[in-house]
Amino acid sequence: MDSIHIYGGNLLRGEIRVQGSKNAVLPILAATLLVRGTCVIRNCPRIADVYHMQNLLQELGCPVSWAGNTVTVNASKVSDNRMSGESVTRMRSSVMLLGAMLGRIGEAVMSYPGGCVIGRRPIDIHLAALRKMGVEITEEEQMFTARAVHLQGTEQKLSFPSVGATENVLLAAVLADGITVLENAAKEPEIVALCGFLTEAGADIEGIGSDRLVIRGVEELREAKYTVPADRIVAGTYVTAAMAAGGSIFLEEAPADQLGALLEAAEGMGCSVTINKEGIGIDSLRRLKPLPYLKTAVYDGFPTDLQSPMMVAMALAEGQGIIEESIFENRFRIVKELKKMGAEIETVKNKAYVHGVERLQGTMVDAEELRGGAALVVAGLAAEGRTVIRNRHFIERGYENICKDLRGLGADIAIG
Ligand code: EPZ
């Protein structure tokens, strides 16, 4: 069965290591296309989205191999400019191959990446930015062709600090002619990781970590080895699990410096947080205090990807709180599933009004997307009795071993 079974109520105790970052490794794998040779990417999470990116790279003629969590990509030859519609629509982050293909062969034919349940997920900001670099884009129904005789560095400002659009501009700019100045760039840690890989391969990038990136095009990139940083969203998900289920855990390699907004909220709800260079400790030994107001924002605000897991913690707090989702237009789909478990939550447009309850009841619930699915796991850990979460495959897109990890913390959880 494609499900996860949980018997809730166990306090979480112990320590686990946090996996490599999905949202860092995907653009880095796309970036290996820019290197006429072999790159080695370490600490790659074995998750569906990475396997899917591997398939896309192989479709383009690049052999990809695994050894443990290390991936080797040989992009000496790129034999195609076209990705199959099925592959592209199945994973949104395939759009990152656009910038990489333009940088490598000056052309890409691909279908529009699918939207998903959390929002329409358009790519207008990506295409507008690439057009300013001299890319001609001709759009058909579902497909479009992007062509650049030569990519020209230019000064431009994104209308919104889109993570994906920032990544696509970086991938197109590192081998472009001249200098690219990108204002209002996204500052998420995944952008910093991508810049880390690109500079390791010889790219010339200034302003890394800021909202103003200056990229000087170079002739070519060299073979590189790079270690993917820990996944801040997986780490944050496990922090909310300890908050909701109670207990005392330590998350090895968790990037505390990237989770300030979450850890501040956790302390505000009565948890005690310890941070050291090995990771994050979180103790949640009494009923959570309410968090009156939470608004998601671009980095370094509260991450939208932790909004659903945090909603579960708030649903069990001793009071009410309001969540405002400011990044995606439809990211409250988990509410109806949490209400089946006894949560008291109402939504009006992009706000959710959460009234804390003492207990959630285990029952059958359906995951509909990645982070909502992970939040249902958090709810199952805290609930009384048995919770069965269907559509486990959504969760496996981003969590390498969520059941094994949580069992390592004492949870009664297994795949069904
Ligand atoms: C990345 O998506 C992440 N995905 C998302 O994580 C994350 O939620 C998001 O950044 C925000 O942090 C990956 O890195 C693979 P955006 P991305 O472009 O790049 C709108 C997860 O759970 N927009 O910053 O798609 C867009 O619709 C996933 O791991 C446009 O309107 O995010 C959204 O409302 C979910 N036009 C907002 O901007 C565009 O051209 C943020 O999108 C691009 C984006």
Image: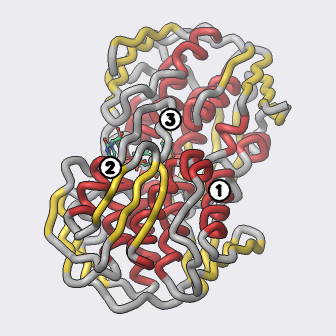
Q: Secondary structure at mark 3?
A: loop
Q: Dot 1 corresponds to which residue?
A: 52
Left or right, 124 with reference to 252: left
Q: Position of residue 404 (x, y in %)?
A: 78, 46
Query: Is residue 131 rendered to the left or right of residue 282?
Result: left
Does ligand 1 reach within 8 Å of label 2's beta carbon? yes
**Ligand 1 occupies quarter:** top left
Query: Quick one: 182 or 385, which is closer to the camera?
Result: 182
Tell me which numbered mark, 3 or 1, is placed earlier along the sequence: 1
Mark 3 and ligand 1: say if the CB distance to the nearest ligand atom is below 8 Å: yes
Closest to the observer, 347 or 169: 169
Please identify the quarter of the rendering in which residue 365 is found. top right
Q: Residue at x 15, y 63 (%)?
A: 156
256 left or right of 264? Answer: right
Label 3 and label 1: CA atoms lie apart by: 16 Å
Tell me if the residue at label 1 has its CB under 8 Å from ligand 1. no
User: Mark 1 Cα within 10 Å, few/some/many (few <14, many 20+)?
Assistant: some
Q: How is the image coloured?
A: secondary structure
Which x, y percent locates residue 275?
A: 48, 54
The answer to which image quadrant residue 244 occupies is: top right
Q: Please count the marks in the image.
A: 3
Q: Indicate which disc, 3 or 2, sits on the residue closer to the N terminus.
A: 3
Q: Earlier in the sequence, mark 1 or mark 2?
A: 1
x, y percent for residue 95: 45, 56
- Asked which secondary structure carries label 2, the reply is loop
The residue under label 2 is which amino acid type? Tyr
